[in-house]
Every structure is written in structure tokens, then in C-alpha cells.
Image: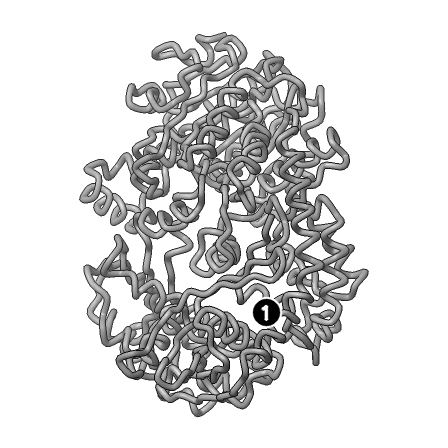
Amino acid sequence: MSYRIAVRALCEFTARSGDLDLRFTPSPTAEEGMQGHRTVAARRNPGYQSEVSLEGRHGPLLVKGRADGYDPQQNLLEEIKTYRGDLSRMPDNHRQLHWAQARIYGWLLCQSLQLPAIRVSLVYFDIQSAEETALVQEHSAEQLQAFFEQQCTIFLEWAQQQLQHREARDRACRELAFPHGQFRPGQRHLAESVYKAASTGRCLLAQAPTGIGKTLGTLFPMLKAMAPQQLDKVLFLTAKTPGRQLALDAAGVLFAQSPRLPLRVLELVARDKACEHPDKACHGESCPLAKGFYQRLPAARQAASQVALLDRQALRQVALEHQVCPYYLSQEMARWSDLVVADYNYYFDFTALLFSLAQADQWRLAVLVDEAHNLVERGRGMFSASLDQQQLALARKSAPQALKRSLQRLNREWNALHKDQITPYQAHECLPQALLKALDLCVAAIGDYFNEHPQGLDAGLQGLYFELLQFARVAALFEEHPFLFDVSKRTLSARRSLSRLGLRNVVPAALLRPRLEAAHSVVLFSATLNPQHYYRDLLGLPESTVWLDVESPFAATQLDVQIVNRISTRYAHRQASLTPIVELMADQFAARPGNYLAFFSSFDYLQQVAERLALEHPAIPIWLQSRGMDEASRGDFLQRFQAEGQGIGFAVLGGAFGEGIDLPGSRLIGAFVATLGLPQLNAVNEQMKQRMAGLFGAGYDYTYLYPGLQKVVQAAGRVIRSQADRGVLVLIDDRFAEPRVRQLLPRWWAIGSGETAQDCR
């Protein structure tokens, strides 16, 4: 069995040294880098060869890659690196890494063409001035072969471990037994479909009821498919922290069944949550965990590879034992783990780590997308951008003199954009080119300044720079994809206004599709993927995608669904609805005391009902979700739901408690949903509705109805978590009785027509 590795990955393993140094220096974007490579290649003679595919072996090691360019006339191999700023400030360990890559390619080319010697060049291309700096070395084939073999030998011990681990992992996954002995009803159907999707290399869109065990029902069959499908990794991607924990818990169940299971599981967490020294910068002169990072990394990597379940706590422990940064150790271990549990953005975002590594190292991936209904809004967010003029105003006050002119020009073009705007909100058909030009010049000026003054960067100016970069990146996509450009203006005085610019992605399909197609197999699953055409249209699923609607294992008698069609929760009727809702909740609580969740459309509405209930029925215990709850506060909220307890927890529909929480048995016996969950009626959503109508002919449904009902069904799914559960669901609004609304509710619910909660009892 051979071990395949990319040239870049080999050199990053063997040739990196010194400190971890992440001092902010603006670097070229991916598009600028590609353009720089094309510019250099276009300057070469007609016989110049670009993107030369090469490979070579050393024992079981197969090393592959593409050299940037080769000039046969000069017998010159070029490794091209784009940069901006002062080349002399490039850290020496970066230069060493670049030379290592160039020499490896040099040997692979000598071997391929049977060359006795070759000239190897590092070509640094300044994207600002378009000037090249070429550093050239001459090497014999023997010298390059010796260097190649030296690097391979350094890596080989690790590669042998990896091969042994891979063989043991594949053997164990083949023999893996389902940990609970028997599947839950519906869970086997889901698992079989996931395995088939992996076996055929297809995409699966699976709607499966809450409570059947979707996490284990998707993870187990995908692990079983690893060996026969020769998968390098499985990614389990989630929208929220509770989803990550469910995946880690499922992995824990597998380890409990097979304590010696040779499977490496890694949890990736955000940098701000993993950082041990948030008051320090990420370089050796500031942070002790960055100083000498690459000298201590091999031992830390070896130790981490021996820990099966590298969740946040376990990885932190290993990192601190070896005095390395936990966050960057986790990024290193992403290369060597079998199952990676992470947020959506690690694979789908513009600069996604896992997608970048997968492309560079040619991983064969299977991707599990948990609670996939969230990917629509999350996808839009990844490919959207906004700019606030207030942020620009603050940056202008503190900006150095060298940047005043470019910032003032940007502000001038910004003011020109909204000076004739009468209404507070205005959508535009196209992007203002004068503003974009000023923005590009501003980005270049700030980038140059940061390169020349890397110490003591102003946080406000740096924050603005990142926002400008994102806006420019999204603006480059505007002509090719459905976007909404709008200006939200706020008047400060008769002579002064400020505004916010929005570049809103309307349909993320075309931007998500390449990520979906890059994986061997993708399974997107959720309890709410109805109607399927909505998700197919907005997520960019391949034509060969299979749809699965898993039958519910729950009987209609388990959930008493009551539609209260005598109350309207529309905004205009909110005040009139307070007393009827309070009496309805009190009557239900009196009829069947226990723990309930009550969902409302906003914190204000929630607060009004809770205050009225506390005033009129003080004996009923209540607890409320508040704005901006941290993880500890959310935990305290959920702790109130004790077995055999009594009380009502008030929450916002679509918030932290509307999905991804598990309160089985008597911890939760019912839910009130006093809203259809429709997105707020505002100018932005009305523009989205118009765009949706033009694209799909169903503007209201795509913008309001489908997203709203999805939240309702998710919230309702908190009540019945097993076949032993019994509970009540009270849907409060006359619109729930409408046929087009009811057809979007789960089929297994038994709902009579025109009922009220009182009639049901």
C-alpha cells in the first residue's frame, strides 16, 4: 500500500521551522494569485510550459504536484510566489519553505526528463507593481535527489504510522457493529440510504423526523463506507454548537462499544474560543505558544495522534502539555484525522480551511451536513457583505496621514451614492463603479501601509480593511450571481447622513455547488426539508441528487396537535392576543401540569405574554430566554427542564432553543407556538421576495412561508423524542388552518380542521 502526499504538504511537514508568525500582512487574494501566475507565464517564451504535473516515489511514498513553470530553452524550473509589500520583510522560514518546494519539483522534473542538472528559480511577483524578483540556484540531479530523499525520510516514519493507522481504521470500520444492537424505526432506512449514496458517489437530501437518531444514523453508515469507497476523511458539518456536541457524543458511543477503535475524531472550534492568550498577538515575540511553535509541533502532533477523541478539551490538554497553540494544533490535526466535526464555514466559506486542504491534498471526502435547512441562510451569509459608513468615519479620524486621501475619496463617492436618496432604504440594479474603484484604491493603500508598518496596527482601521476586502470579494461575483445591492440611509441632521451598504446573496446555489461536487458523496439531512424543490433550487444540489423522506416512527396518538384558529398573532393583533394566549396556556398547564416550551416571534412579544402570565397566574413557574445569552446562560435555561418538573420556558422561534436540543420524557411534555415564524416584513425581505418571484415564480413562499414553517416544525420536534414520549403541541394562529400551510406540516401529525385547543380537550 502506498501513501500519497502533495509536494506542498510534504514540505510543510518537513521544512517548516521557527516561530508561528501570523502578524497581519495583507497578502494577495486567490484570484490575484492566479492572475499573477498567468501574468508571469505570459511573459515567457513560446516554449514555456505551465502547470507541469509531476510525481515521484520513495519507498511507499508517492509524492505528487504541479510545478508552476519550466523553460526547456534555459533548463529553468520556476516556483512562482505572489506577494504585496516589502519582500525583504518576508520571514526566513517562509523562504526556506518556498525553496524546499522548488527543489522537490526540481528533482521530480530531472527524474521525469532524465536531466543531469537543472536551474531552479524562486520568482516573487509583486501584484502591486507587477515586478518580478527571481532567485536562481543551480543543482545537479544528484543533489536534488538527495534533498528529495532526505525530506521523504523525515516524513517516512510518520507515513508508515499513517499507513498502519489507515489499514487498522479501514479494517475496524468494515467490522463496525451498530452500537445499539437494533436500529430505531426509520433509522435503518436512513442508514441504508446513506451507505448507498456513499457507494454510488451521489448526493442525498434526506428528510428524517426529529428523534429517530439522525446523527448516528448518518455517521455509522458513512464510517462503514470508508474502506470500500477508499475515503480519506468524513466531515460532519453543523450549523450550531449543539450539533457539534451531538456528533461528538455519537462518536463517544462508538468508542464506548469499541474502546480500541482506531478512529481519529477531531473537533474544530473558532479561533477566539481556542485562544489561550487573547491579549497577545500570534507571533513569537508576543505569545509564548507561538515562539518555537514548529520545533515543538512534531511532538505535539505525535501525542495528539494517540488521542482518539480530540474534542476541544482533549486537544487543549495536549497543546498545553507541549506548549503549542491549541487552535493551530487543531488545524494541523485536520490533516491527520479521520472524522472532523466542524461548523459549516470550515468547508463552505470563501476561505474554508477544510475545502482548501481537500483541494491541495486531493482528499477523497464524504460530507455529512447536519440540520441542512440552515445551510440556505448560512450560505447567503458567507457570500454577502456590508459596510457601515460610521465605521469609515471612525477610521478616518484615527487614520495616518498617508491614508487620509484614499479614505476621503471613498467617503466622497459613498456620499454621492445616497445624496439624492429620499427614502431610508433603496435597492439598486447595479453596483456604482466609481465607489468600487475608490474602494479598490483604498484597499490597496491600506494594504501597502500595513506592509510598511506591521507593528502597532490600529484595530479600527484593520477591522475596516477586512470589511472592505469582503465587500470587494463579493462585488466581484455580482454580475454572475443573484445579488441584491442596497443602501440603508439614516439622517443625523439636516446636512449630514450616514448609510450602510449591503451586498446580499439571494441564491447561494452556484457558490455552494462546487463544494458539493468536490466531495465523493454529500448527505444533507434534517427534519425540515419540505418542500424539496426549495432546497434543490437554493443549495445548488447536483442533478443526480437523491431525495429521501423517511417515514416517522411516531404514532399520531403520541402528539396531540391543536390548532387555535380563533387567535391572530399578526403584528397588528398582538395586544389583542395577549389575554387569550395567557388563558390558553394556563388552561393547558392546569389540565396537564409539566414542563412546556412557549415560542414567540420576538423578544418583545415573549416578554409581554410572560409578564401577563406572571401577573394573572403567579403560581405557574416561568423562565425566559434573553437577548445575547452566552453558553452558560443557555445551559442554565435548559437545566430548568427537570424530569417530572413543572413550568413554562419562553423562547424565540428560530433561536437557540428552537432546534438542536434534546429534552426527552417528562423533561418536556408540550410546546406552544404563537407565530408562523415568518421573517419580518421589511424593505429588504420585500426586495428578496421580488427577486425570488422573478427567479422561481413563488416570491412569498420562498421568502416568507417556507422559512417560517421550517422553524415551526423544528420547534415542534422538541416534544416527541422517542416512541415512549407523549405530548401536546398547540399551534396558535388562524393561518395554521389554511390548506397551503397545513400541507407543509409533517404528514404523521393528526390535525382536525378548524379546531381550537379548547375543542380538542
Name which residue lies at 43% across and 78% down: 80
Q: Which residue is rendered at x = 42% and y = 59% of the image?
A: 350
Residue at point 61%, 83% (across, down): 92
Depth order, front residue of 405/54: 54
Residue 622, above or below 91: above
Q: Residue 284's x, y, as percent?
A: 70, 77
Residue 273 lies in quadrant: bottom right
Amino acid type, residue under disc 1 in the picture:
Cys
The one nearer the camera, 478 or 575, is 478
Q: Nearer the viewer, residue 282 or 15?
A: 15
Residue 82, quarter of the rendered image: bottom left
Establish if 134 lies above or below 684: below
State whether residue 618 appears in this view.
Answer: yes
Q: Position of residue 528 (x, y in %)?
A: 43, 30
Residue 657, can we see it? no
Outermost residue, right direction?
321
Colour mapping used in the image: one colour
Residue that appears at 67% across and 60% down: 156
The image shows residue 132, relative to residue 486, as above or below, that is below
Q: Position of residue 565 (x, y in %)?
A: 37, 19
Left or right: 703 as drawn, with respect to 191? left
Look at the picture and state if 115 lies above or below 241: below
Name the spot of residue 294 as percent of width and height, x first.
69, 71
Number of numbered tags placed on the structure image: 1
Instruction: Answer few, some or many: residues within 10 Å of disc 1's Cα (few below 14, many 20 plus, some between 14 and 19).
Output: many
Residue tagged 1? 11
Label 1: element kind: helix
| Front position in the image: 444 or 100 | 100
